[in-house]
Image (spheres, rainbow, N blue to C red):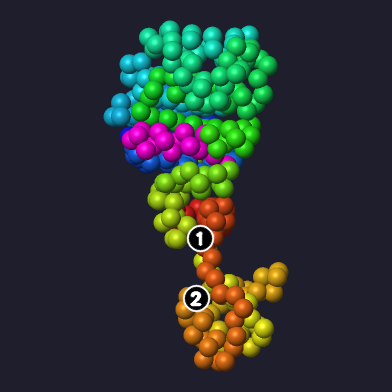
Amino acid sequence: MIEALNLTKRYGDRTVVGGLTFTVRPGTVTGFLGPNGAGKSTTLRMTVALTRPDEGTARIGGHAYRDLRDPIRHVGALLETSAPHRALTALDHLRWLARSNRIPLRRADEVLEAVGLTDAARRRVGTYSLGMGQRLGLAAALLGDPPVLILDEPVNGLDAEGIRRLRELLRAKAAEGRTVLVSSHLMTEMSMVADHLIVIDRGRLLADTGMADFIARHGRSYVRVRAPEPVRLGEELRSKGATLATAPDGSLEVSGLCAAEVSRTAAAAGLVLDELSTHTGSLEETFLALVARDHAAPGGTRV
């Protein structure tokens, strides 16, 4: 597990991370979400001892990162600061890492194949595109076959094939019982890969819950209905306590009643329905709404 207890980091008068506590468990992909400047990267850096917290602790498997023997075998990290020497080939870079950490050299070839860089293994890193550099960073994180992966914005620069490969790899690692913590600003992609979410804003915890529970609790659900007589239907639905909004295409978005109640109300009034469906807000919509509510609350409020 990854455990953060009261993690706090200040820069001058500004608190970047304030009293953050959470646990990332094995066997799941945990998404780490927050708007720009929320403290995500600082939190991840404190977890792997690249930044010293002013208060609190971070532990991986019960140990501080700095106390791990051969940390590359315990934790695979891809952070924005990771950058190999531009004059090295990808293969040489990974073999150097393997040799210096007593890892079989064959692992370099294995992880390059896993991230789709076999054909570019002997090219100098300085010639790599941003996406290829991200793949190489992921290969380095996988090199020690670690039980824990910590990845900060791993999809940056990846093309569609690279994103698909990364998604499949993360799901496979979690299925093996490993602990996977991923920070990303791409909500659509996160909704496809994450089982659990940790959401922070202004360095504070807003949510620590499963993906489905997060959307069900914080998202907007409504019934979409289309009818030949929308004005009459709206009057009938309002009389039952519904709240209505008109979509740009003329359909009604009904809150406060379920689809069955909408159907029964229309039938009782002799109204025909052309469309009736239930919609739940996307991860992106839910995340943005939660952050907006937090910013609107005086001093910020954990939701």
Is residue 178 magenta-colored? Answer: yes
Q: Quadrant of the N terminus?
A: top left
Kind of residue at disc 2: Ala
Q: Residue at x 43, y 38 (%)?
A: 171
Element assignment for label 2: helix
Q: Nearer the viewer, residue 202 or 100?
A: 100
- The spot of residue 196 in percent (x, y) is 41, 46
Q: Which residues are magenta?
A: 166-185
Can residue 3 be seen in this snapshot? no
Q: Nearer the viewer, residue 65 or 143?
A: 143
The residue wearing badge 2 is 259
Q: Is residue 101 above or below residue 211?
A: above
The residue wearing badge 1 is 219
Q: Nearer the viewer, residue 270 or 52?
A: 270
Q: Is residue 225 above or below residue 129?
A: below
Q: Is residue 121 left or right of residue 58?
A: right
Can residue 167 be seen in this snapshot? yes
